Amino acid sequence: MAQFNTAMAAPLATCPSTTNKVTISASGKADGTDTTAIQSAINAMAAKSGGGTVLVSAGTYSLPAAMLILKPNVTLCAPNRAVFKRTASTFGYILDTGAIDGVVANNTGLVNLTFDGGPVALRGNNLRVESNVFQNVSRTAAEIAANVDAFGRFGLWLRAASASSIINNDFLDLEYGGIFGHSIAAQSAISGNTFSRVSEPIHLFCASDSTIANNTMSQLSRMGVEVQIESNQSEPVKYPVARATRT
């Protein structure tokens, strides 16, 4: 599959300035060592008063099968970019903050990371997802032959996300879609993102009081943006989607 050239990726964002921080580096091993190191760093920061930042050194982190769990008040930030690559042969999420198991993880962040080969799932208030790359999530040849549904082969799943910013990210080669969300509210913003070779860039259910703007889209197989609003929602979703092209 295609890879984003780092020269094409969104500009690097600034990592949070915080007293509590720890730096991790890739091991170069494919045995789960990186998964253990990242999770241990997340847990350590979550245990500190007010949380903290895990600074991810540049490199490729091999993540076989276990899913990373991002905890409340913890940000993962790569000052010079880093790749989290899922290397298992079967489908699975790279990281979750509770969208799957129902646990809410507020005040979390993902900054300057590339998530390659698996989706990310986030749930909570005040989420910061900035200057990341989400790429290469699709069914295997065996799954296609077995007629496995393509659902879930997206880059980012947002569940009950409010007061959150999803900005300046790149989404590439995602069979189902770019951002799939449910219950997006409280002045959340999805803006400045680039989508290429995805089925549907943005699909939100039960969205209100939020903005979708200035996203760039190309080579779509279904549609650009779909927003479903329940009849009892009084605040509109603003979505002037700029520079959207279908080729």
Image (tube, grey):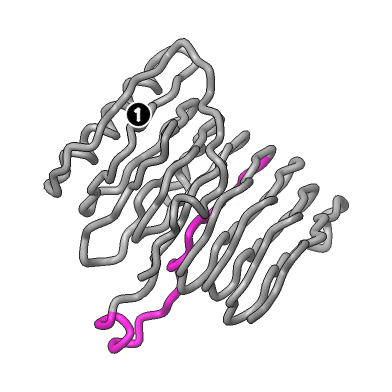
Under circle 1, the secondary element is helix
Where's residue 209, x and y in %? 80, 48
Mark 1 residue crowding within 10 angstroms, few (<14) / some (14–19) / many (20+): many
Question: Is residue 145 in the magenta section?
Answer: yes
Q: Residue furthest right?
A: 234
The span picked out in magenta is: 141-162
Residue 232, picture quadrant: bottom right
Say which residue appears at 67% left-offset and 78% top-offset.
246
150 up-or-down from 83: above or below: below
Viewer-proximal residue among 231 and 95: 95
Say which quadrant the N terminus sits in.
Answer: bottom left
Horizontal and vertical percent position of residue 103? 46, 40
The residue under the point 32% across, 23% down is: 23
Between 219 and 224, the one lying in front of the other is: 219
Instruction: Left or right? Give the position of 175 relative to 242.
Output: left
Amino acid under disc 1 = Ile
Q: Nearer the viewer, residue 224 or 14?
A: 14
Q: Which residue is mark 1?
A: 42
Q: Residue at x 49, y 51 (%)?
A: 7
Residue 214 lies in the magenta-colored region: no
